[in-house]
Amino acid sequence: MGVIAAVAGCAVQQPSPYSDVASLLNAPPPQTHEELAQRCMYLRQEIAQQRTIASTAPRVSPGVTILSIQEQASRNIAALTARSASLGCNEAPVMQGKPASPQDKGDYIDLCMAKCKQYTSRTPEQCFDSCK
Protein backbone atom coordinates (compact mmCIF):
# COMPACT_ATOMS: atom_id res chain seq x y z
CA MET A 1 0.00 0.00 0.00
CA GLY A 2 2.92 2.33 0.58
CA VAL A 3 3.73 2.06 -3.12
CA ILE A 4 0.24 3.23 -4.03
CA ALA A 5 0.52 6.23 -1.72
CA ALA A 6 3.94 7.14 -3.08
CA VAL A 7 2.84 6.86 -6.70
CA ALA A 8 -0.49 8.57 -6.02
CA GLY A 9 1.19 11.57 -4.45
CA CYS A 10 3.07 12.36 -7.64
CA ALA A 11 0.00 13.06 -9.76
CA VAL A 12 -1.90 15.47 -7.50
CA GLN A 13 -2.21 18.92 -9.08
CA GLN A 14 -4.33 20.63 -6.45
CA PRO A 15 -4.81 19.43 -2.87
CA SER A 16 -8.09 17.63 -2.44
CA PRO A 17 -10.06 17.71 0.81
CA TYR A 18 -10.88 14.04 0.19
CA SER A 19 -8.46 11.62 1.85
CA ASP A 20 -9.11 8.69 -0.47
CA VAL A 21 -11.28 7.43 -3.30
CA ALA A 22 -14.01 6.21 -0.94
CA SER A 23 -14.41 9.60 0.74
CA LEU A 24 -14.70 11.27 -2.68
CA LEU A 25 -17.26 8.71 -3.85
CA ASN A 26 -19.31 8.93 -0.65
CA ALA A 27 -19.27 12.72 -0.25
CA PRO A 28 -22.72 14.29 -0.16
CA PRO A 29 -23.94 15.85 -3.41
CA PRO A 30 -22.69 19.38 -4.03
CA GLN A 31 -25.18 22.10 -3.13
CA THR A 32 -23.91 24.96 -5.27
CA HIS A 33 -22.50 25.41 -8.75
CA GLU A 34 -19.08 26.20 -7.28
CA GLU A 35 -19.16 23.01 -5.21
CA LEU A 36 -20.13 21.03 -8.32
CA ALA A 37 -17.27 22.54 -10.32
CA GLN A 38 -14.82 21.74 -7.52
CA ARG A 39 -16.14 18.19 -7.10
CA CYS A 40 -15.92 17.55 -10.84
CA MET A 41 -12.35 18.84 -10.84
CA TYR A 42 -11.44 16.53 -7.93
CA LEU A 43 -13.06 13.58 -9.69
CA ARG A 44 -11.12 14.27 -12.91
CA GLN A 45 -7.88 14.62 -10.95
CA GLU A 46 -8.49 11.37 -9.08
CA ILE A 47 -9.30 9.50 -12.31
CA ALA A 48 -6.02 10.76 -13.79
CA GLN A 49 -4.20 9.78 -10.62
CA GLN A 50 -5.66 6.26 -10.73
CA ARG A 51 -4.60 5.91 -14.37
CA THR A 52 -1.08 6.91 -13.36
CA ILE A 53 -1.10 4.34 -10.57
CA ALA A 54 -2.22 1.60 -12.97
CA SER A 55 0.36 2.49 -15.59
CA THR A 56 3.32 2.90 -13.24
CA ALA A 57 2.63 -0.18 -11.10
CA PRO A 58 4.71 -2.49 -13.33
CA ARG A 59 7.76 -0.28 -12.87
CA VAL A 60 7.57 0.03 -9.09
CA SER A 61 6.13 -3.27 -7.92
CA PRO A 62 7.07 -6.76 -9.08
CA GLY A 63 4.94 -9.85 -9.68
CA VAL A 64 1.39 -10.52 -8.57
CA THR A 65 1.16 -7.20 -6.73
CA ILE A 66 1.10 -5.45 -10.10
CA LEU A 67 -2.16 -7.16 -11.03
CA SER A 68 -3.81 -6.33 -7.73
CA ILE A 69 -2.76 -2.66 -7.98
CA GLN A 70 -3.96 -2.43 -11.57
CA GLU A 71 -7.26 -4.18 -10.77
CA GLN A 72 -7.93 -1.85 -7.84
CA ALA A 73 -7.08 1.19 -9.95
CA SER A 74 -9.45 -0.05 -12.69
CA ARG A 75 -12.25 -0.51 -10.15
CA ASN A 76 -11.58 2.97 -8.76
CA ILE A 77 -11.62 4.51 -12.25
CA ALA A 78 -14.95 2.83 -13.03
CA ALA A 79 -16.50 4.03 -9.76
CA LEU A 80 -15.14 7.57 -10.14
CA THR A 81 -16.33 7.77 -13.74
CA ALA A 82 -19.81 6.62 -12.70
CA ARG A 83 -19.90 9.18 -9.88
CA SER A 84 -18.78 11.91 -12.27
CA ALA A 85 -21.54 10.96 -14.71
CA SER A 86 -24.16 10.82 -11.94
CA LEU A 87 -23.25 14.38 -10.90
CA GLY A 88 -23.41 15.52 -14.53
CA CYS A 89 -19.79 16.69 -14.62
CA ASN A 90 -19.59 16.42 -18.38
CA GLU A 91 -22.94 18.11 -18.97
CA ALA A 92 -23.06 20.57 -16.07
CA PRO A 93 -23.53 24.17 -17.13
CA VAL A 94 -20.41 26.17 -16.48
CA MET A 95 -22.16 29.26 -15.15
CA GLN A 96 -25.56 29.85 -13.65
CA GLY A 97 -27.68 32.80 -14.69
CA LYS A 98 -27.72 34.75 -17.91
CA PRO A 99 -26.59 38.29 -18.63
CA ALA A 100 -28.89 41.06 -17.45
CA SER A 101 -28.69 43.05 -20.66
CA PRO A 102 -27.56 42.53 -24.27
CA GLN A 103 -24.40 44.58 -23.72
CA ASP A 104 -23.44 42.23 -20.87
CA LYS A 105 -23.68 39.26 -23.25
CA GLY A 106 -20.09 39.62 -24.52
CA ASP A 107 -18.65 39.85 -21.00
CA TYR A 108 -20.80 36.93 -19.90
CA ILE A 109 -19.63 34.70 -22.76
CA ASP A 110 -15.96 35.60 -22.17
CA LEU A 111 -16.24 34.83 -18.46
CA CYS A 112 -18.26 31.69 -19.10
CA MET A 113 -15.75 30.44 -21.68
CA ALA A 114 -12.85 31.04 -19.27
CA LYS A 115 -14.61 29.11 -16.49
CA CYS A 116 -15.57 26.33 -18.87
CA LYS A 117 -11.95 25.88 -19.96
CA GLN A 118 -10.79 26.04 -16.34
CA TYR A 119 -13.26 23.60 -14.80
CA THR A 120 -14.09 21.18 -17.62
CA SER A 121 -12.44 19.13 -20.32
CA ARG A 122 -14.86 20.40 -22.97
CA THR A 123 -13.73 21.58 -26.37
CA PRO A 124 -13.99 25.30 -27.15
CA GLU A 125 -17.06 24.56 -29.30
CA GLN A 126 -18.75 22.69 -26.45
CA CYS A 127 -17.94 25.54 -24.07
CA PHE A 128 -19.40 28.08 -26.48
CA ASP A 129 -22.60 26.03 -26.89
CA SER A 130 -22.92 25.77 -23.11
CA CYS A 131 -22.35 29.50 -22.60
CA LYS A 132 -24.59 31.00 -25.29
Image (cartoon, grey):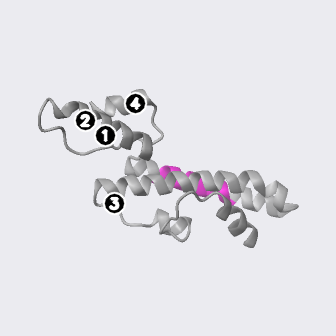
Q: Rate crowding at label 2 as few (under 14), some (14 to 19) or many (20 or more) other CA atoms within 10 Å.
A: few
Label 2 or label 3, whichever lies nearer to me, is 2
Q: Compared to 75, does 15 lie above or below?
A: below
Q: Rate crowding at label 1 as few (under 14), some (14 to 19) or many (20 or more) other CA atoms within 10 Å.
A: some
Front one among 89 and 17: 17
Which of disc 1 and disc 4 is earlier in sequence? Answer: 1
Residue bounds of the magenta highlight? 72-83
The residue shown at (52%, 64%) is 15
Q: Compared to 59, does 93 lie above or below?
A: above
Cα separation between marks 2 and 3: 27 Å
Give residue 111's mark.
1
Front one among 25 and 99: 99
Which of disc 4 and disc 2 is earlier in sequence? Answer: 2
Q: Rate crowding at label 4 as few (under 14), some (14 to 19) or many (20 or more) other CA atoms within 10 Å.
A: some
Label 2 or label 4, whichever lies nearer to me, is 2
Label 1 or label 3, whichever lies nearer to me, is 1
Cα separation between marks 1 and 2: 6 Å
Cα separation between marks 1 and 3: 22 Å
- Does the magenta-highlighted stretch encompass residue 62? no
Q: Secondary structure at mark 2?
A: helix
Q: Which residue is mark 2?
A: 107
Q: Which residue is mark 4?
A: 126
Q: Which residue is mark 3?
A: 30
Front one among 86 and 121: 121
Is there CB contact under 8 Å for labels 1 and 2? Answer: yes
Q: Secondary structure at mark 4?
A: helix
Is there CB contact under 8 Å for labels 4 and 1? Answer: no
Q: Quadrant of residue 53?
A: bottom right
The kind of residue tagged 1 is: Leu
- Does the magenta-highlighted stretch encompass residue 79? yes
Instruction: Give percent across and percent down for residue 106.
Output: 24, 30
Is there CB contact under 8 Å for labels 2 and 3? Answer: no
